[in-house]
Amino acid sequence: MSPDETVSTHDLIELRVDPAVRWNPDPAFVAASRTVYGMSSGVKFRREVSCLEFSFKPLRMVEVDLPQPGGKLQRKLVWYMVYRVRNTGRTLKPVEKEASSFAAEIAPGEPVRFLPHFVLESQDREPTGERVDKAYLDRVIPAAVSVIRRREARGNMALLNSVEMSQQLIPVSDARTDGGVWGVAMWEDVDPRLDFFSIYVGGLSNAYRWEDTPGAYQPGDFPGKGRRFSRKFLQLNFWVPGDEFHQSEREIRYGVPVGKGQLYDVADGVAYRWVYR
């Protein structure tokens, strides 16, 4: 549909679901085994799983004059991470073995897209022990990209923001050709009181999983009740020993300080891990 086309209200169909209607596991006119639910209950979903190689430079800060809604410029501190993604060209392919069992084997991959999802999330705790609920999504800040590029990039090296990165097809790298692509993730208005935090990177892998909460589904409930879908993220751990009054990138440490692993749900010294969320 082109931008000039319009849709008549007569072309729209509204679907309403009555909350009082419950899933009927016992159909009246067909065998239960012939329903969609019955035929899909024993199906195993097997697919290829890919993963991009991720590397990054130290987490840094830069002060930039950013335009505000009123038209004026405001000096702000922008946190940023310069990173590179690389497609190794290898995937895990499910191969059927004896007795209908499956095994994962390495297979050649193809060019893929990286749809970046960066979240800077606090791992601090309140005096009561509860987690401080603060999280910041990656922002596209054009005024900051030009400043960061002059500081971090060499020559004509491109430095893509998250929107530009998602438009790229990451080619397969080999011994002769390195198809790695450089990008930058940026965060604005980060609380200066943060001491312990993690950066979660989504989109590096297409792996996911379903989790069923025990006892959440009861006969007669809608299919999928209590089921949770989660994707694979890379968790990068950081901490800042400085204070809130003088923020400096030199104070940012990569990893977990001694005795604070429980804040990140990891053992002491674990700088990164893969998690589902």
Image (cartoon, grey):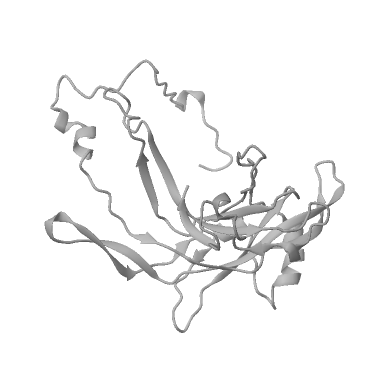
Q: Quadrant of residue 39?
A: top left
Residue in the image at 77% along x and 65% along y: 147
Direction from residue 133 to residue 14 in the image, left or right: left
Image location (x, y in percent) of residue 169: 49, 64
Residue in the image at 58% along x and 42% along y: 3
Task: Reply above or below: 85 against 121.
Answer: below
Image location (x, y in percent) of residue 264: 56, 52
Which one is nearer the viewer's eye here, 133 or 208?
133
Task: Reply above or below: 74 against 228.
Answer: below
Image location (x, y in percent) of residue 13: 43, 25
Query: How many labels were placed on the picture?
Result: 0
Residue in the image at 72% along x and 68% along y: 149
Q: Quadrant of residue 62?
A: bottom right
Which one is nearer the viewer's eye here, 171 or 268?
268
Which one is nearer the viewer's eye here, 261 or 6?
261
Direction from residue 4 to residue 77 in the image, left or right: right
Direction from residue 277 to residue 194 in the image, left or right: right
